């Protein structure tokens, strides 16, 4: 019969203990660093009704987030990733989102905040402001998609682009001057011929173009090849901006017909030795309009072996940035 003390001694290795000393003199490994979640959200309001979409992310594999929304009007908080809320009175409210990962690590910032200004809906109902937007880098086009009821038509329209500039045209084209990724709250106010006023607001992220500089050490012809895409943001454009202007992709995430196509640059004409090509990627918008990371282009390779440009548009969650949203190769061939 095996004695009980002998059985206990045999089990020690499986319990993670040492038979001599009990601690091993500090031989344990340090716990892995737990990265704080990045907290952000997008918003969209029509009159008193708002929708808030978390664009938060956590780079740690396997982490999950819990949320707390505060709508700024004394109402009950919400704990879902995305929330809808209808205010009871017109006014300006500060909305906040707090997020914590499953290890108890709070987000950064904690909370994320934004101000929303809402107006009471027209009475009787029927006129509702709404708009769509498309952006390429800092330039955005806004389209008024408002609807009218009760026989009313549009009397006046006012855009506020969130940077103290405004317009009344439709569509309205606006170029921002941000030098870093920036989210603006854009507001459309319409008045119908019955005197009813309605507003719609959306958060719109914009970012300057990402740039790659490629130097041709010899007189060369140049081609570009669209290798792959893995993204959902519209209007990701790839453009050569110097010393010539040529668009390579107009909507990179959706230009699948161009995949594998070899595109001559400068019509196939050679560039002089020591020419520097400037390639810009103009970031578009995703369905959630929330930037999680600054859009960035990376360049590997050289003149002799060709360059590979990998771009991440800044949208996504765990595992981002993965730099596979757009992959393009640039090849230079020496010319006599």
Image (spheres, rainbow, N blue to C red):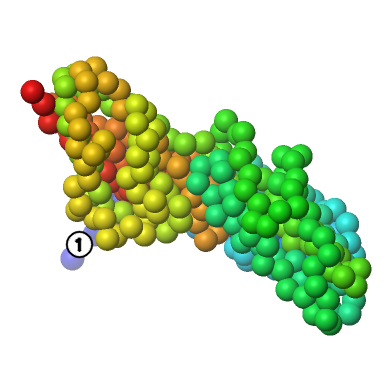
Where residue 62 sits, quadrant-wise, is: bottom left
Q: Which residue is rendered at x = 19% and y = 37% of the image?
A: 268
| 281 displayed left or right of 140 | left
Q: Which residue is rendered at x = 41% and y = 46% of the image?
A: 237
Label 1 residue SS: loop
| 125 displayed left or right of 69 | right
Circle 1 residues within 10 Å: few <14, some 14–19, many ≥20: few
Residue 28 spot, x, y in % from top left: 35, 36
Q: Which residue is rendered at x = 56% and y = 33% of the image?
A: 180
Residue lying farthest left?
336
Image quarter (top left, top right, bottom left or bottom right) of the N terminus: bottom left
In the depicted structure, whether residue 331 falls above or below residue 304:
below
Front-lying residue, 317 or 45: 45
Residue lying farthest bottom?
150
Residue 303 spot, x, y in % from top left: 18, 26
Please indicate, yes or no, whether residue 19 appears anywhere in the rendered image: no
Front-lying residue, 55 or 229: 229
Residue identifier under label 1: 2
Q: Which residue is rendered at x = 81% and y = 55% of the image?
A: 117
In the depicted structure, whether residue 175 falls above or below residue 230:
above
In the depicted structure, whether residue 143 falls above or below residue 140:
below
Residue 300 spot, x, y in % from top left: 24, 32
Residue 6 spot, x, y in % from top left: 23, 54
Please indicate, yes or no, whether residue 255 appears anywhere in the rendered image: yes
Front-lying residue, 91 or 27: 91
Image quarter (top left, top right, bottom left or bottom right) of the C terminus: top left
């Amino acid at each position: 019969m095996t004695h009980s003390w002998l059985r206990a001694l045999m089990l020690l290795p499986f319990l993670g203990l040492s038979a001599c000393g009990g601690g091993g003199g500090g031989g344990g490994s340090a716990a892995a660093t737990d990265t704080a979640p990045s907290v952000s959200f997008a918003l969209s309001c029509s009159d008193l009704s708002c929708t808030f979409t978390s664009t938060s992310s956590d780079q740690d594999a396997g982490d999950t987030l819990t949320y707390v929304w505060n709508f700024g009007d004394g109402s009950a908080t919400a704990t879902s990733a995305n929330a809808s809320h209808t205010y009871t009175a017109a006014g300006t409210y500060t909305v906040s989102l707090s997020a914590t990962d499953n290890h108890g690590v709070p987000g950064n910032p904690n909370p994320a905040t934004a101000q929303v200004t809402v107006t009471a809906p027209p009475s009787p109902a029927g006129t509702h402001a709404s708009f769509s937007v498309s952006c390429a880098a800092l330039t955005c086009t806004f389209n008024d998609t408002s609807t009218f009821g009760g026989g009313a038509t549009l009397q006046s329209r006012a855009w506020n682009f969130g940077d103290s500039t405004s317009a009344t045209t439709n569509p309205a084209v606006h170029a921002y001057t941000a030098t870093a990724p920036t989210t603006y709250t854009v507001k459309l106010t319409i008045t119908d011929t019955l005197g009813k006023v309605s507003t719609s607001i959306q958060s719109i992220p914009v970012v300057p173009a990402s740039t790659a500089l490629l130097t041709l050490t010899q007189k060369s012809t140049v081609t570009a090849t669209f290798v792959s895409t893995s993204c959902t943001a519209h209007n990701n454009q790839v453009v050569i901006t110097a010393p010539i202007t040529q668009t390579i992709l107009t909507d990179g995430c959706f230009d699948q017909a161009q995949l594998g196509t070899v595109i001559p640059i400068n019509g196939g004409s050679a560039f002089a030795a020591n020419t520097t090509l400037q390639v810009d990627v103009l970031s578009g918008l995703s369905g959630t309009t929330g930037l999680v990371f600054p859009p960035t282009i990376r360049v590997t390779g050289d003149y002799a072996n060709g360059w590979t440009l990998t771009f991440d548009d800044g949208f996504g969650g765990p595992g981002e940035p993965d730099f596979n949203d757009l992959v393009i190769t640039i090849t230079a061939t020496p010319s006599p």
